[in-house]
Amino acid sequence: MTYLQRSKFVSPGTQMAFPAVLGLVLFVALPFALAVILSFYQYRIGSPQSPEWVGLRNFARIFADDTFRRALLNNAVFALVVVPVQTALALALALLLNQSFRGRTLFRTLFFLPVIFPMALVAIVWQLIFSPEATGLANSLLSTLTMGWWEPTDFLRDPRFALPAIMIMSIWQGCGFQMIILLAGRQGIPEHLYEAAEIDGANRRQCFLHITLPGLRNTLIFVVLVTTILAFRLFDQVHILTQGGPQNATTTVMFETVRAIFDRGQVGRGAAMTVVFFLIVVGIAMLQRKYLREEREQS
């Protein structure tokens, strides 16, 4: 029986979904299953000893480790600050760039450009901005704004400022991605709703609260979900700028996972961290699915 003959017994929808399902199995399901299996063993890369079954000991060890707990805290703080600030800024830009004015396309391009820049390039540029010298852009700007009160600070080597510095860079780099999604969502809201509201005497604030925000609800949930996942995947900025320091002030789950596997060769420990990270991401996705379901049921 030929492929065309066999395909008659398979629905077109199943045939179209097969490549996506195959990709999920090969690049998500199988790697995660391997990580779960390895998390129950103690094994070092290059060690002549065979893997040793340790059960849940790897999970107990990572949660007892102050560095890993600090990494979880840093990820949580990073997400709690970056997600709302970046989303609010992206929403403001999307609404602004939805207006008709000369050069609108140029401004949309300029705000989106940082998204397509390689993170290594972005990190190096911001490393120069956060230069510890008095002539560094950040120190010079703060000194000017405070009329000389601000003293030159090494932002990336100071535990008080290292994580906020990475937050600022991440907000600047990723805001354009959210802006484009929110702009598309805003353009999907029928204009006749705003026209009817204006006829009824509604002002801009009322239109925003009662038309724009409800119309962007699902889009905002999607944006928050994606941004939160990216916040927990924080690695490149930390690896390039601070190497997890100073005093573990910027270490993250992803950074600790990579360091455990590739620097220390602790495969089982790194796999346990991967499983914890995966469960956190799945939990966030399930919350988003719950809220979207509630929105569909209400509508």
Image (cartoon, rainbow, N blue to C red):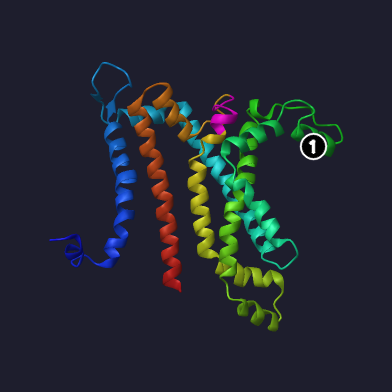
Picture coordinates of residue 85, whole percent (x, y): 63, 50
> Where is residue 104, by image quadrant?
bottom right
Question: Does the magenta portion include 85?
Answer: no
User: Which is more toward the observer, 122 or 198?
Assistant: 122
- Which residues make up the magenta segment? 238-246
User: Which is more toward the observer, 214 or 45?
Assistant: 45
Q: Is residue 202 left or right of residue 20?
A: right
Image quadrant holding the N terminus, namely bottom left
> Where is residue 181, by image quadrant?
bottom right
Q: Going by the picture, which residue comes out furthest to the right?
A: 147
Q: Secondary structure at mark 1?
A: helix
Residue at point 61%, 36% (across, down): 121
Residue at point 61%, 50% (across, down): 175
Picture coordinates of residue 166, whole percent (x, y): 61, 37
Going by the numbered disc 1, the residue's amino acid type is Leu
| Above or below: residue 253 compared with residue 27 | above
Question: Does the magenta portion include 239?
Answer: yes
Q: Is residue 289 left or right of residue 195?
A: left
Picture coordinates of residue 88, whole percent (x, y): 63, 55
| Above or below: residue 49 compared with residue 101 | above
Picture coordinates of residue 171, whole percent (x, y): 62, 45
How many numbered discs?
A: 1
| Above or below: residue 10 compared with residue 258 | below
Q: Residues within 10 Å of mark 1 (few under 14, many from 20)?
A: some
> Where is residue 94, by image quadrant?
bottom right
Q: Which residue is mark 1?
A: 141
User: Which is more toward the observer, 94 or 199?
Assistant: 94
Q: Going by the picture, which residue comes out furthest to the front?
A: 2
Q: Going by the picture, which residue comes out furthest to the top?
A: 48
